[in-house]
Image: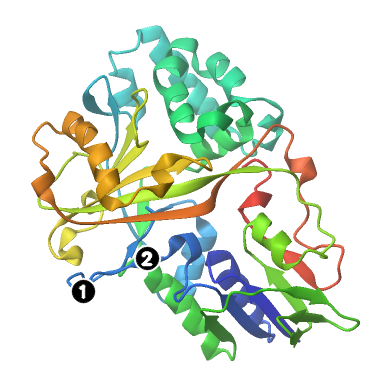
Amino acid sequence: MRIAIIGGGFTGLSAAVRLVDSGKEVVVFESADSLGGLAGCFKPKHWNWCLENYYHHIFTNDKDIIAMAEKVGEPAKFKVPVTTSFIKGKEIQLDTPISLLKFSELSVLSRIWMGAGLLILKLIPNGVFLERFRVVKFLPWLLGKEGYREIWEKLMKAKFGPYVNQINMAWFWSRVAKRTKSLGYFDGGFLRLLEAMGKYVQTKGGEVRLGRAVKGVEKKSEGWMVDGESFDGVIITTPAPITQKIAPNSGVRWPVLDYLWGQTLVLELKNKVIDGYWMNILEKNWPFLVAVEHTNFVDKKNYGGDVVMYLGNYLPDGDKRLEMKEGELLELFLPYLKKINPGFEKSWVRNMWTFKAPYAQPVFPINYSGKVPGLKTKQEGLYVANMSMGHGE
């Protein structure tokens, strides 16, 4: 049996590994010149490791990824970096129950209330039932109005912008339930794992075709045609709007869904900027929502000995920042970097890169799971799998 897999990210490659293990003939189509999708990376000549275009790590409960990495010989390495928040002009740690109880900007009652609410979410084994509630209505009740106003409302507005009122509580529950203090990374970056998965597929007789953007998938009387090539079955892992475009007659009914772009400005710097690895911005009207100092998690010796930092955003279509080049974004961000670290100077910046990708964050509304198509479509031999099928998670 010959199977086409469209998309060379983790979903497509995981399917490819399983299929070649079962004796199937597999061809993976990836439109980019390297594997990865949103986990794709870049590597300046003076770096030893490739760096993801968008910040990446895994959690200790990502069992499937951990098992896959072990299988292909690229096990994850775990550390416990510090997560902080920038609030009222200060970088503070807010990633443990003790640090939350010490957070004097909230009343004692609010701290206890928030801690109890987060614990409840952490203990729920499956929170899909929460999708009937909107975050903006449910969270103030669960975590307390003061805590919601000072922390979570700012985070939600910064991330989802005009769509903040749509987000369901199942999405928020999944963020809390999934998070672990220990975070994992891979020697050489995520590309090392992706390439190991690709090599595994090829060793087992499969093909990986890079730089191959599929234009059309069609059902024939016997099997499927992918850009005129015959297959017995197809697995499409591209975002739903792209899937709809390349397979318009698939019979899959995609629910109407809004999406946000992902954007990062990556800075190579002479000096450290923040104390933590991941810093949420809890200030109003900032031009970026998160600062991630990657080299506070992964040794900077792998990146020429310099500090590497991401400034990240999720942005709606039409946002002016999506049209800005590296230097323009840096000028926009500079006053805010100085607020984070008063000693910050533009001269610290050795290099900078910017990346953007559509469909990076689906906006999951209430009661979404009942509208999601299944992995197996009504068309025999056609399967779809993408982030839009998250059932609100």
Question: Which element carries disc 2, helix, strand or loop?
Answer: strand
Question: Which element carries disc 1, helix, strand or loop?
Answer: loop
Where is mark 1, residue-wise? 45
Residue 317, percent from left and from top: 53, 43
Name the quadrant of the C terminus.
top right
- The answer to whether residue 180 is seen in the rendering is no
Residue 140, percent from left and from top: 53, 15
Residue 30, percent from left and from top: 55, 74
**Is 248 on the left or on the right of 287, as rendered?**
right
Q: Quadrant of residue 299?
A: bottom left
In the image, farthest residue toward the right? 221
Residue at the location (81% across, 58% down)? 252
**Is 15 on the left or on the right of 91, as rendered?**
right
Q: Disc 1 to disc 2, how far (Cα)?
A: 13 Å
Looking at the rendered structure, the kind of residue marked 2 is Cys
Where is mark 2, residue-wise? 41
Residue at the location (10% across, 41% down)? 345
- Which of these two is toward me, 361 or 84? 361
Residue at the location (36% across, 22% down)? 284
Q: Quadrant of residue 87?
A: top left
Looking at the rendered structure, the kind of residue marked 1 is Lys
Q: Residues within 10 Å of mark 1 (few under 14, many from 20)?
A: few
Q: Is residue 215 above or below residue 260?
A: below
Residue at the location (46% across, 14% down)? 113
**Is 184 on the left or on the right of 217, as rendered?**
left
Name the quadrant of the N terminus.
bottom right
Disc 1 and disc 2 in contact, CB within 8 angstroms? no
- The answer to whether residue 379 is seen in the rendering is yes
